[in-house]
Each structure stands twice: as structure tokens, then as C-alpha cells.
Image (tube, rainbow, N blue to C red):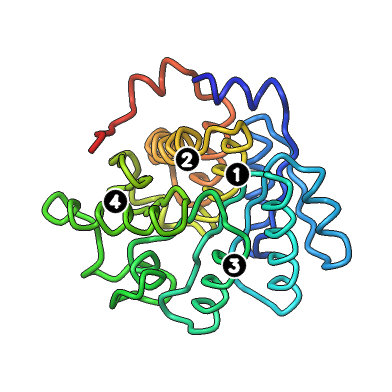
Amino acid sequence: MQIKQSVKLNKPLIHCITNPISINDCANMVLAVGAKPIMAEHPLEVAEITAKSKALGVNLGNITDTRMESMLISGKTAFENKIPQVIDLVGVACSKLRLEYAKKFISQCHPNVIKGNMSEIKAICGIKSNSKGIDVGECDIVTEKNYIENVEILKKLSLETGAVIAATGVIDIIANNTDAYLITNGCEMLSMITGTGCMLNALIASYISSGHILGGTVLAIALMGICGELSQHVKGNGSFRTELIDNMFSISDNVIIEKIRYKLK
């Protein structure tokens, strides 16, 4: 819980270049954990803003020429200044443009965390995937029966890139080249509102600003799952969205310890 308290105490500035579909919710998620969001994306200012930030989160959802240019500028700035950064591989399994851009970003900007669903992780590894648009394909879903082979895919990608790899789904896997955490918190309602993956990316950026890359990523993913569980007994998905942000703001360390479900592999 040291990472969680550090973010609340230090109120780090988090630069998020995300899509307009979820930009408001991402900003509110950053605020909910005590950090400060800035959502700048103009190519002529992003280098300056990233350099003044404590972490960078970039997201490939709803890409444009301008946003792609800005993400690359910011990613290089973050790398040069040793500022932690995370890339969300939205849609790389269904778009050649996004896939080639993601590979370019990873090779030039060296993100500390690479996040995606298992179809997207497979695509970036050059493995055949079965995505449904931006969603994971049924054949790629991580289960109790196939998680070992998926852990090895993540560890190999981590070894090649130097990044922590986060594959989100019913079972989340967070891995570096030696260790892997399996997290089973979460609920179906998380897939019933737009932007929870984007919010999670902003949350990861907030927590890796502490300098604890693996621990910050694990904490962010576990918290999203736990807060989803706490928020699911509502009238509908609109109420769920509000409850999710409220629970992220108010969750106690004791509740996290009580609710978290994880295995170290």
C-alpha cells in the first residue's frame, strides 16, 4: 500500500494522451487516486508537458495523425527523461496501421509497461490472434487451462522489450521476464461501459509514477477489478460508472487486502 499512499501524498502530474471517447473518465480516475491529470495532445506542446510530468499514459484508441505524432513525441521525451510510461495497445489485433505504429512506438520510446488484451499481446508478438475488433477473441481468452502458455508469451515479450507486460481479461496477467501475477478480481459490468480499459491505462500511469513499475501495474489492475466488484450491484451501467469512480476514490487499504485475489507464478 506504500505505492497507493505515495501517489496520494505527492499528487504527481500524469500526462495522458487518450481518446476523446474516454478522456473525461480517464481524468476523473487519475483524480480519484490523488494524482493530477493533464490531457494535452497538441504536437507543439506535448514534449514540454511530458517533461514536466511524473508519468505518461498513451492509448491507441480512436487514433488520428495528430494524436499519433504527439504520442511519439511524448514517448521519446519520457524515455529521454526517465519518466515512466505505459502504452495501451487498443486495436492492434484488428488494424495494420495501429500494429505497425505500436511496434514503432515500442522500439523508439521503450515504454515501461505494455498493456492490452491477450489478442493484442499476441498480435504485437507476431502470433496469430482472433480478436473481435478491439475486444479479445474467444480463442485468446486466458483461462485456468491455458494461462501457463500465455504467461510464457508475456515473459518472452518482457525479455525482448524490457517492459512489464499486462494482459487484461477475466484473468489478468502482469509479468516481467521472471515473475507473473495472475489476478482474478473483476466483474462483467466492467465491459458494459465505454472506456474502462482507458481508465485502467491512466490508473497504471498514476501508480508507476512512484517508480515501482511492476508493483504499480499490479496495484492498478487489482484495484480496477476490486472496485468493479464493489460497484456492480446497481440499477444499470450508468450508475456503475459513477460507483466505479466513487469506490476508486474511497477504497481503504483494509478492503483491498480483504478482496484481492492473486497468484504469483
Decide if residue 155 is on the left or right side of residue 113: left
Q: For the residues marked 1 and 3, what is the alpha-carbon distance in whole angstroms?
A: 17 Å
The location of residue 4, given as percent across then percent down, is 55, 25
Q: Badge 4 local density, few (<14 within 10 Å), some, or many (20+)?
A: some
Q: Badge 2 local density, few (<14 within 10 Å), some, or many (20+)?
A: many
Nearest to the eye among marks 3 and 4: give it: 3
Labels 1 and 3: the sequence-earlier one: 3
Q: Dot 3 lies on which element?
A: helix
Q: Which mark is residue 170?
A: 4
Q: Where is mark 1, residue-wise? A: 205
Nearest to the eye among marks 1 and 3: give it: 3
Q: For the residues marked 4 and 2, what is the alpha-carbon distance in whole angstroms?
A: 16 Å
* Residues under numbered marks 2 and 3 in contact, where contact means CB atoms less than 8 Å apart: no
Decide if residue 88 is on the left or right side of residue 264: right
* Residues under numbered marks 2 and 1 in contact, where contact means CB atoms less than 8 Å apart: no
Q: Badge 3 local density, few (<14 within 10 Å), some, or many (20+)?
A: some
Q: Badge 1 local density, few (<14 within 10 Å), some, or many (20+)?
A: many
Which residue type carries mark 2? Thr
Viewer can see residue 183: no
Q: Where is mark 3, residue-wise? A: 105
* Residues under numbered marks 4 and 2 in contact, where contact means CB atoms less than 8 Å apart: no
Labels 3 and 4: the sequence-earlier one: 3
